[in-house]
Structures are given as structure tokens and as C-alpha cells.
Image (tube, coloured by chain):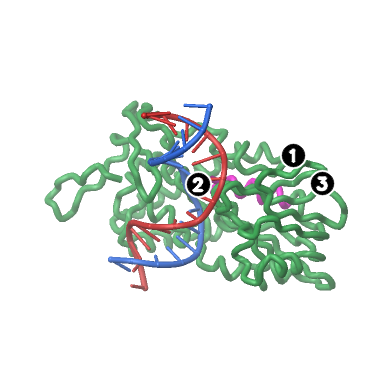
Chain colours: A green, B red, C blue
Amino acid sequence: MPELPEVEVVRRGLETWVVGRTIAHVEVTHERAVRRHLAGPLDFADTLVGSRVHAAMRRGKYLWLPLVAPGAEEPEDALLAHLGMSGQLLVEQPETPRQKHLHVRLTFTDGGNELRFVDQRTFGGLAVERGGATLPPSMAHIARDPLDPLFDDVLFHAALRRRNTEVKRALLDQSLISGIGNIYADEALWRSKLHGARPTGKLTLAQTTLLLASVRDVMTDALAVGGTSFDSLYVNVNGESGYFSRDLDAYGREDQPCNRCATAIRRVSFMNRSSYFCPACQRPPRLSAAAGRPAPQQH
DNA sequence: CAAGAATCCTGCCAGC
DNA sequence: TGCTGGCAGGATTCTT
């Protein structure tokens, strides 16, 4: 369940271990892993072989590696990666036994460690995108993430005000703000003392500002923890980085005392998943039309 | 056109 | 013991 901090840890690992190297061979053992590539796995491999990895980029939860084709000077195409729920990019020695869910294997002309894409649930995948060196076209609808220096807080607030939806839905909408998943959404809302069901159309600029600060705090904290573990050949996603190493205040803490006020944390079903919140700190919104009657305590 | 629901997938765990 | 059903969740696709 990698969110922005986990993906950033992977990006740094790729920057350290893969950038500058030239791809020698590509092995696709699970076609679903390249299902976003319309021309199929053969063309996928053909494009990659001989290309040199120019950089390791990220927007939200997406990664891409701009590629310099043989004989070219500047990158033109890019290798895209999304980890989905359970995807891992691993830098492994060639003799390391195949992982059970190894789907794609890239070897390099220097004969050194190879790059493996391993994914249990195949929600993630790789793709080659033509002309994707700067920003892959398929990523155009993904908003900047809150750690991007060019993320515009005031513009985000205006977009929230225009939307007729709930604040947690908005946090999970990658076209509004990217990089946030279910876990960090709950954590940021808890820190902001905002209920996830609050209507975005009524948020004040102060509330949006507080929410963004909370999002950044949660992610920065996770990054600080996750960033300490990538100093190895193993570019991990699930095992050692981010929220798996830090203490969570809301997510997964049903019936446990709130770390602020000791009220039992509640869990409600929401969008085919769970939302965790403190019913005391995070007061549910009121129905505007119903003369001050409190809204039901659903999500 | 936009909001929300359904869908994909496998490992794990509770319950019988 | 071994089965079954529920749950986990990001992004795309479908429906309303």
C-alpha cells in the first residue's frame, strides 16, 4: 500500500542504483504487469533494450524513468511504474532466486545487479510511453503532490470550494492532489481535527491550510523514517519504509484510545475501505438544510 | 459533466 | 483440518 513517502523512497533507490545504466535484456513473465502498454510486451521489451536510464522521476504515486535511446543525446521515451497495492521494485543480484510474483526483470550492460518488478496482487504495472521524458501524457490528469514546490495551496483551496464532495474523497482524488492514500488521509484528517465527511465547498482557507500542513507533516515524518532504510541494494516498498515503521494516530486503531483525548477511535466503512477517526476530536458535519440537526455519524 | 460505485487481484485470518 | 467468506486497497471503468 505504498503512498507518496514510500514511492519517494523507491525513487531515491532507483536514482542511486539504476540511473546512468544501459538496459541489456528485458524478461516479462506476467503480461498483466505491462498491460498499460498498448503495443504489448514484445514492443515493451524492444523499446527498453539498449536504452540508458537518464533519471528517476515521481509525481504522486507514479514513477517514471526517462530513457535515452541508442545513439540519441536526449531522453525521449520513459519507463513508467506504478506500484499499486503490493508492487515492489527490487535491485537484486542476478543469482538471487526468483521471487514468487516476479513479473518483469531488467538486466544491464554492466552485468551488475538487475531490476525486478515483483507484485503479488498485480494492481501495479510497468509501461513504456513514447515522448514521456518530461511528463508522460498518461499522467497529465495527475495533480502535483503536496511536496512538489510548485503545488499551489490557494489553487487547491479554490478547487475544493468548487467541488461538491467530502473532504476525504477529495484527498483521495489524484486529479486534485496526488500521493495521498487511505492511510495518510486518515492520519492528516486526525491531525487537522477534521471529519472526513465535511463538505469541501464550505472549507475555509484556514482549514485547507491546516489540512495541507497536516498532510505534509505526516508525509515528511514517514519519509524521515523510510529514508533511513533504502541504503542497501534492496529498494523496498512494503517492508521497511514509511507508515510500517511509525506510530499511527488513527488508521487501524479501532476501539483504541485517541492519542489526544482518549476517546475510542471509530471505524466506518467508506468507499469499499475503512475510515478511522476520533468521534470527539473530529466532529461530524451538520446538515445545513436540517436546522442544526446533527448528521448521522456515518463516514 | 461530475460524483460515486463496481471492478481488478491474492494473501491472510476469523469462523465453522 | 480444511473450507469459506470477508477484508485490504489504487486507479480505471462503468453507471447514474
How far is the residue under mark 2 from the one under mark 3? 38 Å
Q: Which-is-in-front pick, marks 3 and 1?
A: 3
What range of the chain is rendered magenta?
A1-15
First along the sequence among labels 1 and 2: 2
In the drawing, what numbered circle is on residue A216? 2
> Which chain does the numbered disc 1 sit on?
A
Relative to A165, residue A87 above or below = above
State the SS at label 1: loop
* Residue B8, x across and y down, in percent: 50, 56
Task: Say which label, 2 or 3, has the lower sequence index.
Answer: 3
**Is residue A14 located in the magenta-colored stretch of the structure?**
yes
Q: Are marks 2 and 3 in contact (CB under 8 Å)?
A: no
Left or right: residue A250 versus residue A149 is: left
Q: Position of residue A173 (x, y in %)?
A: 43, 57
Determine which residue is flagged by label 1: A232
- When the figure is inspected, residue A281 is found, relative to residue A179, above or below; the finding is above
Q: Residue at x 37, y 32 (%)?
A: A254
Q: Are marks 3 and 1 on the same chain?
A: yes
**Most foreground residue, C1 or A71:** C1
Q: Measuring 78% from the left and 41% from the top, which residue is drawn there?
A: A96
> Under tag 3, what secondary structure?
loop
Q: Which residue is mark 3?
A: A94
Q: Position of residue A29 (x, y in %)?
A: 70, 55
The three-letter code of the residue at mark 3 reads: Pro
In the picture, measured across the screen, residue A108 lies left or right of residue A99, that is: right
From the image, state whether disc 2 or disc 3 is nearer to you: 3
- Are the residues under marks 2 and 3 on the same chain? yes
Q: Chain of mark 3?
A: A
Q: Nearer the viewer, residue C1 or A296?
A: C1
Question: How many numbered tags mark residues here?
Answer: 3
As drawn, the label of residue A28 is none
